[in-house]
Image: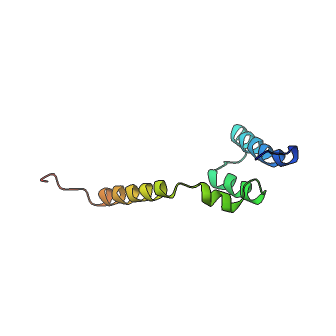
């Protein structure tokens, strides 16, 4: 997929804005704000994002987080 010059402008402006706010400390940029801006500017289609996600990795990380949270709340006894 080739990008035309006008199609390159919004992502580059977005990236420049995020870097500028991070350097100056005016705003605290976060990943979710950048993701929403990318979707609203039309840089990436929502269907493309769903296709590119590795859902097996998301499920694995979710499972590891639940196991870690359960161990944090109630530690395993030393006798085992």
- Quadrant the C terminus occupies: bottom left
Q: Where is residue 25 in the image (x, y as percent from the top left)?
A: 70, 42
Left or right, 15 with respect to 71, comes to: right
Q: In which quarter of the image is residue 24?
A: top right
Q: Where is residue 21 in the image (x, y as percent from the top left)?
A: 73, 43
Residue sitting nearer the eye, 43 or 28 = 43
Q: Quadrant of residue 52?
A: bottom right
Q: Which residue is drawn at 38% across and 55% down?
A: 64
Seen in the picture, residue 41 relative to 21 is either above or below; the reply is below
Q: In which quarter of the image is residue 65?
A: bottom left
Residue sitting nearer the eye, 20 or 1 = 1
Residue sitting nearer the eye, 62 or 72 = 62
Q: Residue at x 79, y 45 (%)?
A: 2
Q: Where is residue 60 in the image (x, y as percent from the top left)?
A: 42, 56
Taking the view exactly as shown, the residue that stands out farthest to the top is 23
Seen in the picture, residue 28 relative to 66 is either above or below; the reply is above
In this rendering, the count of numbered labels is 0
Q: Which residue is drawn at 46% across and 57% down?
A: 56
Q: Residue at x 77, y 47 (%)?
A: 11
């Amino acid at each position: 997929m080739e990008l035309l010059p006008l199609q390159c402008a919004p992502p580059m402006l977005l990236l420049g804005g995020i870097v500028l706010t991070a350097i100056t400390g005016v705003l605290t940029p976060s990943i979710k704000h950048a993701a929403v801006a990318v979707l609203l500017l039309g840089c990436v289609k929502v269907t493309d994002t769903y296709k590119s996600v590795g859902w097996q990795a998301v499920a694995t990380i979710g499972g590891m987080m639940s196991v870690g949270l359960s161990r944090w709340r109630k530690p395993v006894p030393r006798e085992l």
